[in-house]
Amino acid sequence: MQLLTEYRKDVPRVERFNVVSRVTHWGHTVTFLLCLFTGLPLFLNVGVDSVGLLSMANLIHRTAAVFLTIFLIYFVLFNFVGIINWIKDILRFGMNDLKFLILFPFEFLGFPVKMPPQTRFNGGEKGNSIVTPTMVILIVCSGYVMWFPQLFSDGLVRLAYPTHGIAMILATVMVCMHGYLGSFHPGSGESFWGMWKGTVRADWAKHHHSIWYEETYGNKEKAKEGEE
Ligand code: HEM
């Protein structure tokens, strides 16, 4: 069974994600998963600490959380324009995105459906772009409040605990669906290469994100045709 689609160098490719986005994305994936697996025993309060495993989990959890924060700051500092364009794309949510969300379960189950044209991010990705980063920001903020309670009011510290847990659960559900859809789901493999190597096949981009492709690369294509 082939899990990912083949990475084709011999066909025209277009840039999808710059290096800052990719470093942040994979940096967040590693640190998020480290935080999740070391945070779960702390959250569920399981395990006996006689051999120091819980203390070790706590240390890894806090260290990974600091790196996750550093990636967040790095992304904001070095990809500010990218973030603005990302927000602008999310705000373009419209009928085509709604239709995409309605049709997606049918496509997921293997029914032949014709998806409406999509912008840079499709309807589902726009939803993920809102929910996951919001949950990650809530997790980060509530985490530091719990870590340094002496700096914050009692009410805020009390609020931080359920916030951290609920945001963690929501983010985990999103990441499980997103991780599968962004890699092994048939037809999604090419999007994985966009996040891994930075480029996707031009024909895939034209098919899956036709509005974005037309707006970003359409004119260059027309100019090239004019030269020929
Ligand atoms: C578990 C492994 C993961 C895989 C295989 C994966 C894969 C991908 C891919 C392929 C894209 C680009 C989709 C496109 O072409 O637009 C993407 C985008 C994105 N990823 Fe991940 N990702 C993973 C984990 C994570 C984690 C842990 C987070 C957050 C903590 C995250 C947050 C995002 C966000 C916010 C986007 C942009 C919106 C979207 O395209 O849905 N990802 N991911």
Image: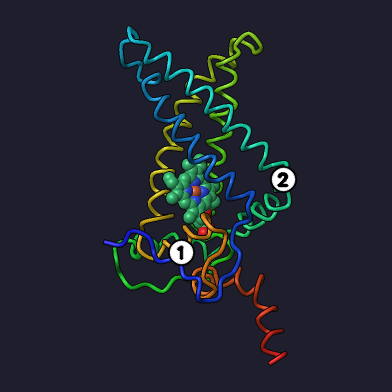
Q: If you read the primary sequence from the N terminus, does the residue marked by circle 1 or circle 2 appear first?
A: 2
Question: Is there any visible trace of residue 66 in the rendered image?
Answer: yes
Q: Element at badge 2?
A: helix
Mark 1–mark 2 Cα distance, whole angstroms, equals: 26 Å
Asked if disc 1 is less than 8 Å from ligand 1, the answer is no
* Image quadrant in which you'd find residue 107: bottom left
Q: In front here: 9 or 46?
A: 9
Q: In front here: 198 or 126?
A: 198
Q: Amino acid at mark 1?
A: Glu
Left or right placement of residue 53 versus residue 214 in this view: left
Estimate the x, y position of residue 6 in percent, counting from the top left.
Answer: 40, 66
Above/below status of 181 relative to 151: below
Q: Which residue is mark 1?
A: 190
* Image quadrant in which you'd find residue 49: top left
Q: How is the image coloured?
A: rainbow
Q: In front here: 138 or 19?
A: 19
Residue in the image at 40% along x and 18% along y: 42
Asked if disc 2 is less than 8 Å from ligand 1, the answer is no
Give the label on residue 78, or none.
2
Residue in the image at 59% along x and 62% along y: 16
Above/below status of 110 relative to 70: below
Q: Amino acid at mark 2?
A: Phe
Estimate the x, y position of residue 20 in percent, counting from the top left.
Answer: 64, 49
Q: Quadrant of the C terminus?
A: bottom right
Q: Element at badge 1?
A: helix
Question: Is there any visible trace of residue 128 in the rendered image?
Answer: no
Residue in the image at 39% along x and 29% along y: 37
